Image: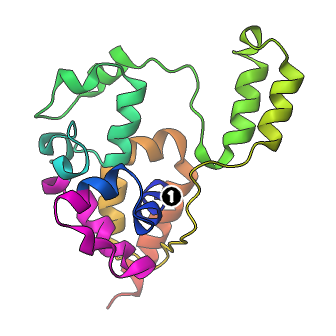
Amino acid sequence: LAVYQSLYAYGLERRGHVWQRLARAGLARLYAPGPAGFAQWLAFVLDPRHAALLDATFAPGLAAGPAGMGLATWRFLRLACPGLERLAPDYGIGADAIAQRYALDAVLRQEDLRENLASLASTHLAHCIADLPAGLAWLREAEPVNVSQARVAADALPAAVLQRLLQADGLIYRNFYPEREAAIRTRLATVATAQP
């Protein structure tokens, strides 16, 4: 969810790959409502019919169906599994194909990037860094890059959009953010109980 919030906020500033592709397709209006338009934008982005608008390699077949994936998952898998986009551009990619191509030894979480990079530098990459203390100091002091100024709230997302998010990006939630998946499921259960 935070990835999508960031993509939308970046687009509000007319920046980023997704903004550029949507604007070229005549869909800049998706950003017109400002931060309040996030739910509508997210519903659009999670709709499998719009996959190819978001990324040329993100075929609608990859986004469709019960095993379909969201843009965040597709972007992750393209980095984690080299050559995956050439494997099955028009249909779903199975767990076996992912497992065979998965090339990562570490996954860095954006929200903990400095700490994750410092840990990686101190362990797996320590042999590659000539002056580790200086490198770690640089990580602590470096200014953030590509920070978006817009703030996008996700607390009023419709239940259908949250359900589609969990379906489309379940792989990321299950493997890296189980606590956030649980929070969204609790929120959905609360909404379902509150409805007559």
Residue at point 89%, 24% (across, down): 133
Q: Nearer the viewer, residue 122 or 162?
A: 122
Q: Nearer the viewer, residue 142 or 108?
A: 142
Q: Position of residue 10 (x, y in %)?
A: 46, 61
Q: Nearer the viewer, residue 182 or 73?
A: 73
Q: Is residue 7 left or right of residue 129?
A: left
Task: Find disc 1 in the rendering and name its residue.
Answer: 2
Residue at point 51%, 74% (across, down): 153
Residue at point 33%, 58% (across, down): 19
Among all residues in the image, which is located at the extreme top? 127
Residue at point 58%, 25% (across, down): 106
Residues rendered magenta in the picture: 22-50
Q: Secondary structure at mark 1?
A: helix
Classify 10 Å Cα crowding around label 1: few (below 14), some (14-19), many (20 and above). Answer: few
Q: Is residue 132 above or below residue 7?
A: above
Q: Can the viewer see residue 54? A: yes
Q: Can the viewer see residue 167? A: no
Q: Position of residue 118 (x, y in %)?
A: 76, 31
